[in-house]
Image (cartoon, grey):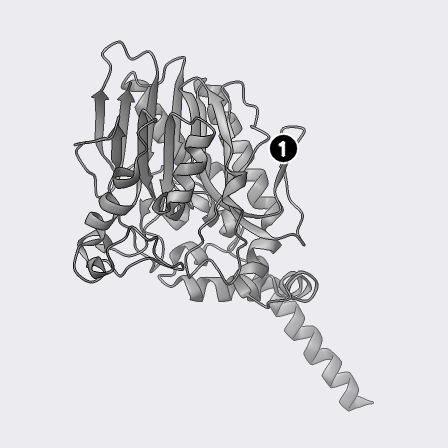
C-alpha cells in the first residue's frame, strides 16, 4: 500500500508540475511593433489612379503572432503607413503574402515559442505544453501521424478566429478590399461572416478576401500545386476550382505562390476572364533569390521549361522566366507578386516584388525588410 501511495503521490507531483509549467509564460504585453519599413513607393501606370492595388510586404517576427492584439497592431502599422501616403482610396485592394496567417499557430502559447531560434524546437515545446490536447488530436484526426497536421488542427479554431477578426477590422477600418495572405486551416468555409473550420477535415493552404464593409467573401482560394514541404500534410485543390472575383479593381484571380508557375493556372484564370492576377508568395531561406535555381519543387516541370536552367540560372531569374512575369497572359492587365519577409525562427525569407502591366515587367525598388508599393492602373 505504501508503495502504491508513493507512486500516486509521484504521479500527482509530476502532473502538478506539468500544469504549472504548461500555463507559465502565456501572459505577455504587446510591445510596440517594429514596422522595419524601408520602402514606400507609388507606381503610376495610370495618372488618374481610378483603381489601385497596394502590395504590402510585411516584415514579421514570431512576437507578432502571440495574440490577436500583437497581430493586429503589427499589420495596422503598414495600413497606417499606406493611408498616410495617400494610397488607400475608394477602390483600393490590398494584397498580402502567403503564409502570413500560418504562424498564428503559436497564438496563446508560451512566449518561449517566439524566443527560440528553432522552429522544430518551438513546435516540440508547443506539443508538450498542450500534451493532452495534442494527443487527443493526434489519435482522432491524424491518420498520417504528421505532427504539423496535428498542431494546425489543434489550433485551427483560434487561428481562424484571430485571422478573420483582424482582417475584418482592418478592411472596415480603412474601407478597402483585402486579399489577406494565406493561412493553414482544415476544411474552411465562411458562415455568418465567420471562418468556420472542421477539425477532422483536410488541411488547405487557403486565402480569403475581405470586403470594405468588413464582410468575408464566401468563395475561398485554395492552393493547387503544393511544394514538397507541404505535400505530407496539406491537400491540393483542383485548379478548375480557381475562383475569379468581381472586385473594384476588376475581375481578379489569386494564385497562391507555386500556382503561378504552371500554365494551367493562367489558362483557368483567362477562361474566367480575369484581368488582374495577384500572387501571394513565401520563399524560404535567406538569400534564396541569389542562389542557383534547383528546378520545380514537388511537381514535374511543364513542357515549356528548359531543363538545363536548373542549376544554371538564379532563383530570381527563374521566378521572372517561369512564374508571373514570364507567364503573364495577353488578355490580362495587371499582375502583382508579393512575398513574406521576416525573422521566422530558422526558416529565413527572401523574395522580390514583381509588378507586370500588360505583359511588361515594371522596375521597382526592392526592400530586404518591409515595403509598400502603390500601383495605379
Sort mark 1 into few (<14), some (14-19) or many (20+) by Cα contacts within 10 Å. Answer: some
Residue 322 or 291: which is nearer the viewer? 322
For the C terminus, give its image quadrant.
top left
Is there any visible trace of residue 49 in the rendered image?
Answer: yes
x, y percentage for residue 153? 60, 54
Residue 33: quarter of image: top left
For the N terminus, give its image quadrant.
bottom right
Residue 99 or 369: which is nearer the viewer? 99
- Of all residues shown, which one is farthest toward the front? 303
Residue 264: quarter of image: top left
Residue 94: quarter of image: top left
Is there any visible trace of residue 256 in the rendered image?
Answer: no
- Of all residues shown, which one is farthest toward the right? 1
Q: Residue at x 25, y 40 (%)?
A: 326
Element under label 1? strand
Looking at the image, how many numbered discs can be counted on the residues?
A: 1
Q: In this view, does 349 lie above or below 231?
A: above
Q: Residue at x 55, y 34 (%)?
A: 164
Q: Residue at x 73, y 84 (%)?
A: 7
Q: Which residue is drawn at 41% across and 37% down?
A: 267
Residue 120 or 232: which is nearer the viewer? 232
Label 1, on which residue? Answer: 194
Q: Is residue 203 above or below residue 139?
A: above
x, y percentage for residue 226? 45, 54
Q: In this view, does 314 lie above or below 136?
A: above
Q: In this view, does 218 lie to the left or right of 63?
A: right
x, y percentage for residue 193? 63, 28
x, y percentage for residue 234? 53, 55
Amino acid at each position: 500500500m505504501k508503495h502504491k501511495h508513493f507512486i500516486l503521490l509521484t504521479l500527482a507531483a509530476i502532473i502538478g508540475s506539468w500544469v504549472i509549467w504548461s500555463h507559465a509564460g502565456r501572459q505577455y504585453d504587446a510591445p510596440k511593433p517594429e514596422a522595419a519599413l524601408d520602402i514606400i513607393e507609388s507606381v503610376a501606370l495610370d495618372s488618374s489612379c481610378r483603381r489601385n492595388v497596394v502590395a504590402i510586404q510585411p516584415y514579421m517576427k514570431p512576437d507578432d503572432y502571440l495574440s490577436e492584439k500583437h497581430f493586429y497592431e503589427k499589420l495596422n502599422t503598414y495600413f497606417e503607413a499606406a493611408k498616410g501616403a495617400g494610397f488607400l482610396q475608394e477602390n483600393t485592394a490590398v494584397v498580402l503574402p502567403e503564409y502570413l496567417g500560418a504562424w498564428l499557430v503559436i497564438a496563446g502559447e508560451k512566449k518561449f515559442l517566439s524566443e527560440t531560434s528553432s522552429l522544430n524546437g518551438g513546435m516540440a515545446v508547443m506539443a508538450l505544453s498542450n500534451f493532452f490536447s495534442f494527443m487527443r488530436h493526434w489519435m482522432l484526426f491524424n491518420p498520417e501521424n504528421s505532427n504539423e497536421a496535428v498542431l494546425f488542427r489543434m489550433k485551427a479554431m483560434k487561428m481562424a478566429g484571430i485571422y478573420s477578426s483582424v482582417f475584418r477590422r482592418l478592411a472596415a477600418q480603412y474601407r478597402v478590399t483585402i486579399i489577406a495572405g494565406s493561412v493553414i486551416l482544415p476544411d474552411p468555409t465562411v458562415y455568418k461572416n465567420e471562418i468556420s473550420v472542421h477539425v477532422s477535415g483536410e488541411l488547405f493552404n487557403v486565402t480569403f478576401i475581405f470586403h470594405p464593409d468588413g464582410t468575408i467573401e464566401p468563395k475561398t482560394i485554395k492552393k493547387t500545386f503544393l511544394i514538397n514541404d507541404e505535400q505530407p500534410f496539406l491537400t491540393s485543390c483542383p485548379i478548375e476550382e480557381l475562383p475569379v472575383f468581381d472586385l473594384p479593381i476588376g475581375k481578379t484571380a489569386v494564385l497562391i505562390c507555386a500556382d503561378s508557375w504552371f500554365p494551367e493556372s493562367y489558362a483557368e484564370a483567362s477562361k474566367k476572364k480575369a484581368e488582374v492576377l495577384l500572387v501571394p508568395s513565401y520563399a524560404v531561406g535567406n538569400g534564396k533569390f541569389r542562389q542557383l535555381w534547383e528546378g520545380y519543387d514537388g511537381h514535374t516541370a511543364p513542357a515549356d521549361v528548359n531543363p538545363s536552367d536548373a542549376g544554371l540560372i538564379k532563383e530570381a531569374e527563374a521566378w521572372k522566366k517561369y512564374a508571373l512575369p514570364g507567364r503573364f497572359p495577353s488578355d490580362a492587365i495587371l499582375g502583382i507578386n508579393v512575398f513574406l519577409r521576416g525573422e521566422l525562427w530558422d526558416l529565413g525569407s527572401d523574395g522580390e516584388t514583381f509588378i507586370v502591366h500588360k505583359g511588361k515587367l515594371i522596375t521597382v525598388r526592392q526592400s530586404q525588410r518591409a515595403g509598400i508599393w502603390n500601383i495605379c492602373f
